[in-house]
Amino acid sequence: MAPHDTSADGELDLGLLHRMFAEMHRARRLDESMIIWQRQGLIPAYPPSRGQEAAQVGSVLALDRDRDFVFPSYRETAVAVAWGVDLEGYLATHQALWHGGLWDPVADRFAPLQAVVGGSPLHAVGWSHGRRRDGSDAVAIVYFGDGASSQGDVHEAMNFAAIFGAPTIFFVQNNRWALSVPLEREVAGGSVAARAAGYGIPGVTIDGDDPVAVYRATRDAVERARADGTPSVIEAMTYRRGPHATSDDPGRYRSLEDERSAGPDPLDRFREVLLARGVDAAWFDELAATADHELDRLREVLESPRVMAGTDMFDHVFIEPTPQIVAQRAAWRKESTHA
Ligand SMILES: Cc1ncc(C[n+]2csc(CCOP(=O)(O)OP(=O)(O)O)c2C)c(N)n1
Ligand SMILES: [Mg+2]
């Protein structure tokens, strides 16, 4: 997408802007529905991505769906929507049907969801290092939070990416909270992007609520990574506008004043930009109808019986099961009423 995404005056192409808003809107509607479905008992738990749509959509659209690979954490609904992951398979994760989801990670070029905070950056570096060594110019993007950035694995990942020239984009969504812990208690020095300098790689801080700024920064990082394997850190400043997860009550640890400091919603902001560029107001209404249709279909999937074989728990631990796994599998079969 990158070589054709700007018009002569350097503005991003209107078609691309339409696509960005459309994906942000789809993601917002799905996110809202997931919370409702959780309250209705259709899914056990869900971590909302409300307010992070600009960061997620703007970044992933700068990658190439046929060549690159996405490594998400657990809050990347808008990334999955914009990247075109099989959403029926995606819902299976939050339905607790299967660990990382039921889509095909290789076909969709989107790794299983990662609930281990800071777990995915090393996977992304391993993948991109391997691809580079095979002569490919493919790029990995890995999503993680401000809190995750303080995990040791993330520093090891950045260090190795820089040493080996593994083309990885470390995309930090700084939403100012790590569950109930505020930024100043989790990130010493206040900046994740500043840490890139310690590894000798580019690091930028951007307005994560502006999808155009996010897209441009990510596109630049993709170009560097493709050219010579240079990794980058992008710190997208945003705000976790909802609870950490459906089980969380943010009123116990942050004030309304803090929530108001987040500023305007990124969808509202971007809508104004599009209206100023001459987009017809009726276009926004059409998006709502398309989203309704998609959500009806997904809800039907959630209501349909999708039961996984319980033995899957044991069958995918090792290629050749150990005696312990064989014994556990047999004991489970004897005692469990699960299919
Ligand atoms: C290794 C590990 N430690 C702790 C947790 C518990 N935990 C889940 S989410 C979270 C906060 C992560 O915050 P951040 O990285 O900023 O991401 P955000 O939830 O804000 O998107 C914690 C501590 C975990 N899942 N994994
Ligand atoms: Mg956070």
Image: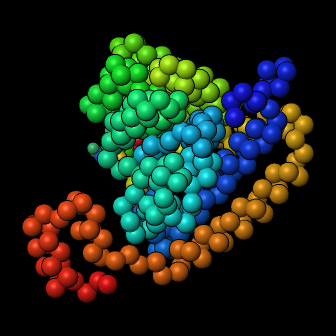
Quadrant holding the C terminus: bottom left
Residue at screen point 71% across, 61% down = 291
Can I make out residue 82 in this image? yes
Q: Is residue 242 visible?
A: no
Residue 67, compared with residue 109, is above or below; it is above
How far from the left and from the top, in percent, is residue 55?
A: 58, 37
Q: Residue 327, position in %: x, y?
A: 10, 73
Q: Nearer the viewer, residue 29 or 294?
A: 294
From the top left corner, tell me how far across and down residue 309 is, in percent.
34, 77
In the shown orientation, is residue 116 left or right of residue 175? left
Q: Give the residue drawn at x 55%, y 66%.
A: 88
In which image quadrant can residue 222 be found? Answer: top right
Name the residue furthest front.
134
Tell which of 82 and 299 is nearer to you. 82
Q: Nearer the viewer, residue 116 or 134?
A: 134
What residue lies at 53% left-to-right and 80% top-to-bottom?
304
